[in-house]
Image (cartoon, rainbow, N blue to C red):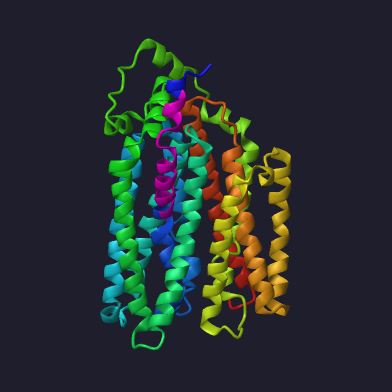
Amino acid sequence: MELPDEASKRLEGKHTAMVVCWFLGNGCLFSWNSMLTIEDYYVFLFPNYHPSRVLTLVYQPFALGTLAILAYHEAKINTRRRNLFGYILFFLSSLAILVVSSLAIYLVHDRFTLRMATEACSLILRNYHANVQGGMVGDLSYMRPEFIQSYVAGLAASGVITSALRLITKAAFENSQGGLRKGAILFFAISSFFEFLCVLLYAYIFAKLPVVKYYRSKAASEGSKTVASDLAAGGIQALPETDDVESKNQERLSNKELLLQNIDYAIDMFLIYALTLSIFPGFLSEDTGKHSLGSWYALVLISMYNVWDLIGRYIPLIKPLKLESRKALTTVIISRVLLVPAFYFMSKYGDQGWMIMLTSILGLSNGYLTVCVLTSAPKGYKGPEQNALGNLLVLFLLGGIFAGVTLDWLWLIGKGW
């Protein structure tokens, strides 16, 4: 039976933690979504370069390899340093992109240098996105399901915010000289500020929330070695490791055992993102034909995807609408493959209204199923095991992204490639 004092600790600061998780999820993808959303600027700088495809693909082998190593050694890695280092690099990379965009007018005749600088920033952003997302999902997995939901909703919200900002800056600078560049500079100035805010939130606020300290203390008592720095930042001195704690740590399930017990959830994450990234953003940016919206068309499609992705991540909060059956989840996820022929025929024969509807379905299903899988994964494990399982699920998510951005190039068959 749970004591009243323990129950109050589990809930104290819960809503504040949910808000902070939302901002941290937002910051994890804000800079990257900024790069994706200004694809019209990169198309202008690098014609015939397919920036929406190349920038997504160039980093992926490094990100996947990095996360595989981190997931394997997860039990020995200092989670606080891992996440904080990632958020600091997000901030510095955003500043670097801001500088590159500011200097673009001087490098316009040296497109190779400009492209290499852009790709380097892309590589850093996405490599450490994998680092931070694995660390955060693992960290939140042994806390409350609402924290994971808030975090992944924040990931989607970054797309909505960047899309809205891009539409505003495009409208504001469309008719001015160098308007695309000015819009990009304003974009990354806002992005840099937002990433700096996330550094402060993670470094000084999150670790001190009572509910976070409670769950991290509980994880430490169950043998977790990754939370010592987080506990120290929250003003709690980790207890010296006793023979009892050491035996608990040795008793934890191995990564292989965890993966075998949850292989359906891992495959679900892979399939969700393989399908989504085979269509978004490359196909939506380049292969949807010419329509009355002109240069606004790709931005509208990306914005609609982001809006419905965000909505989908809140639907599971309504209990009767949350899909929890493991078999039902896998069935629905596999059925999304029907979206591929639907997009193909709609791009050839449909008008922009039907394409916007399909894009909305793609975003809604992506967000909804992501939250259902992450919050339905078994919660009966010890803290260290939940952390490891969270890292493994994100590893398969990244594997799905890699497969998706590779398959996305197949849309170019018959178009000069």
The quarter of the image holding the C terminus is bottom right
Q: Is 18 included in the stretch rendered in magenta?
A: yes
Residue at (27% x, 24% y) in the render: 237
Residue 95: image x %, image y %? 28, 63
Nearer to us in this view, 151 or 222: 151
Nearer to us in this view, 277 or 368: 368
Nearer to us in this view, 363 or 126: 363
Q: How many marks on residues? A: 0
Q: For this view, does 95 lie left or right of residue 126? A: left
Q: Relative to residue 154, is residue 147 depicted above or below?
A: above
Q: Is 347 included in the stretch rendered in magenta?
A: no
The magenta stretch is: 7-26
Residue 218: image x %, image y %? 42, 24
Q: Relative to residue 67, is residue 54 depicted above or below?
A: below
Residue at (50% x, 56% y) in the render: 156
Most common secondary structure along the magenta stretch: helix
Q: Relative to residue 157, is residue 204 depicted above or below?
A: above
Residue at (47% x, 66% y) in the render: 54
Residue 244: image x %, image y %? 41, 11
